[in-house]
Image (cartoon, rainbow, N blue to C red):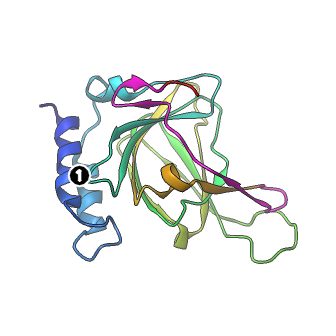
Amino acid sequence: MNDFEQLVLRIKETLGPSSGLTSEDVDVEDLTLLMERYNSKEGEWAEYAMADPCMAYTRNLVDEGNGKANLLVLVWTPGKASPIHDHGNAHCLMKILKGNLTETRYDFPDDDAEKPMRLKSEKIHKENAVAYMADDLGLHRVSNQGSDYAVSLHLYTPPNVAKYGCNIFNPKTGKKTHIAKCGNYSAYGQRVALL
């Protein structure tokens, strides 16, 4: 068993039969430490890292844990970004496996008036860095400003976005649009059939 497979197993063990990161018996710091201790080796996770140059990023399922979490490898196309989005009342831990990713955080729009989204912060996460995000911290956009693909590992708990979707926000107006379901490009190293 390689180090990446051990990380997946340890995350599953740490989550146990709990309800995820919001459970009293799960410590976000323990999960963060597990991710921080893993030193990324491309050969260990490459089978999950399926890219598509026609997409800003791909979502590649690695593990569903106890059904209360999703562990995904996201592959980010050079020069592309996610929309500004929420996390469907879920928590997210993100580890950079390859390259650098820029995370730009925004405040939630405060009323119905159309106006540009308010920037809270911007940070470049370098290879092997770990970041935490949840809706109570605001909204964010993740971008690959490099010239090569970047890859990140995401733990979402509960897996609300995969089941129920999320909201994306127009940066110029703050207008919210619900995306019904965020599907996976691949699952367990196999391309998911297009519907």
Left or right of 65 in this view: 181 = right
Q: Residue at the location (25% across, 66% down)? A: 18
Left or right of 71 in this view: 138 = right
Q: Position of residue 171 (x, y in %)?
A: 77, 55
The magenta stretch spans residue 183: yes
Span shown in magenta? 170-192
Quadrant of image for the C terminus: top right
Q: In the orientation shown, which residue stands out farthest toward the left? A: 1
Q: In the orientation shown, which residue stands out farthest toward the right? A: 114
Q: Residue at the location (65% across, 23% down)? A: 54
- Location of residue 55 by image quarter: top right
Q: Is residue 40 above or below residue 171?
A: above
Q: Position of residue 190 (x, y in %)?
A: 38, 23
Q: Which residue is mark 1?
A: 11
Amino acid bearing label 1: Ile
Element at badge 1? Answer: helix
Q: Residues within 10 Å of mark 1 (few under 14, many from 20)?
A: many
Q: Position of residue 127 (x, y in %)?
A: 39, 40
Left or right of 139 in this view: 3 = left
Q: Is residue 43 above or below residue 128?
A: above
Q: Residue at the location (54% across, 59% down)? A: 87
